[in-house]
Image: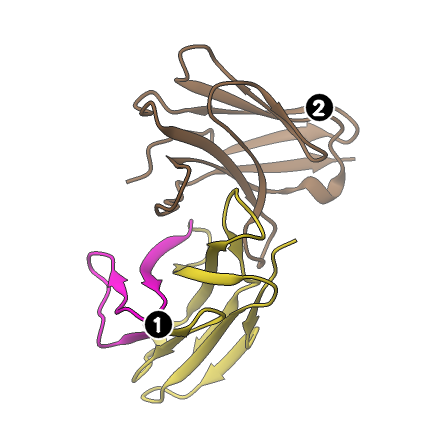
Chain colours: A yellow, B brown
Amino acid sequence: GAVVSQHPSRVICKSGTSVKIECRSLDFQATTMFWYRQFPKQSLMLMATSNEGSKATYEQGVEKDKFLINHASLTLSTLTVTSAHPEDSSFYICSAAGTGGFGYGYTFGSGTRLTVV
Amino acid sequence: DAKTTQPPSMDCAEGRAANLPCNHSTISGNEYVYWYRQIHSQGPQYIIHGLKNNETNEMASLIITEDRKSSTLILPHATLRDTAVYYCIVRVDQGGKLIFGQGTELSVKP
């Protein structure tokens, strides 16, 4: 089945630094990827949608200059949290949709636990 | 905003069927009902989806009412590993964003 690999699984960084999270589709071409954020005891909140080769579309209230998304190839999308602060600590999850491989649902990565200290 | 309503929590005895309800009274004609689940600290996992007919796969069954305003996910023989948050989502089949509501936290107890 379709597999999405997300790396790293957890990261701790100092306040003010930037962190990059990678999301790779391993056995299919991901034409569209979605990035979510999830705070403890809450549901997933969609942050942005990215299509390969295009600029990402951000949901209302999500700062595009803080959460940089790159989707330069059909198998890789990255989310960079710039100048991270403790309030950015959260569980970040990517999801991929593509052609072939599956015709139903989207495949999710296993998530990245970001802690900013 | 999510277009579905689910009870916040449910309990189920191990080995029994778990029936998780979902209301989607404003569903459009071209929108499917999708179910995902999220086990603690993992990414969501696809379970099943349907348009208007009942569906069954190796994981679960999906019963959609004739007016399509509600549905029920059935786990026929719940195990402890089925303890998770279950999300009911409606969206068009091809493309489109998955918007998660609050889901139902299912606890399967021995």
Per the image, is B110 magenta? Answer: no
Identity of the amino acid at label 1?
Asp
Question: Picture quarter containing residue A52?
Answer: bottom left
Q: Residue at x 58, y 53 (%)?
A: A101
Q: Residue A88 has which mark? A: 1
Q: Residue at x 35, y 45 (%)?
A: B96
Q: Does residue A94 appear anywhere in the picture?
A: no
Question: Picture quarter containing residue B92?
Answer: top left
Q: Residue B13 has which mark? A: none
Instruction: Point out residue A18 in the picture as x, y percentages from the top left corner.
Output: 36, 86
**Chain on which label 1 sits:** A
Quadrant where the image shows the C terminus of chain B: top right
The answer to whether B84 appears left or right of B108 in the picture is: left
Q: Residue at x 54, y 42 (%)?
A: B36
Instruction: Point out residue B23 in the picture as x, y percentages from the top left corner.
Output: 41, 23
**Chain on which label 2 sits:** B
Is B50 drawn above or below residue A91 in the view shown? above
Write down the residue under mark 2.
B17
Instruction: Point out residue A46 in the picture as x, y percentages from the top left corner.
Output: 35, 55
Is B94 drawn above or below residue A36 in the view shown? above
Q: Which residues are magenta?
A: A43-70
Question: Picture quarter containing residue A9?
Answer: bottom right
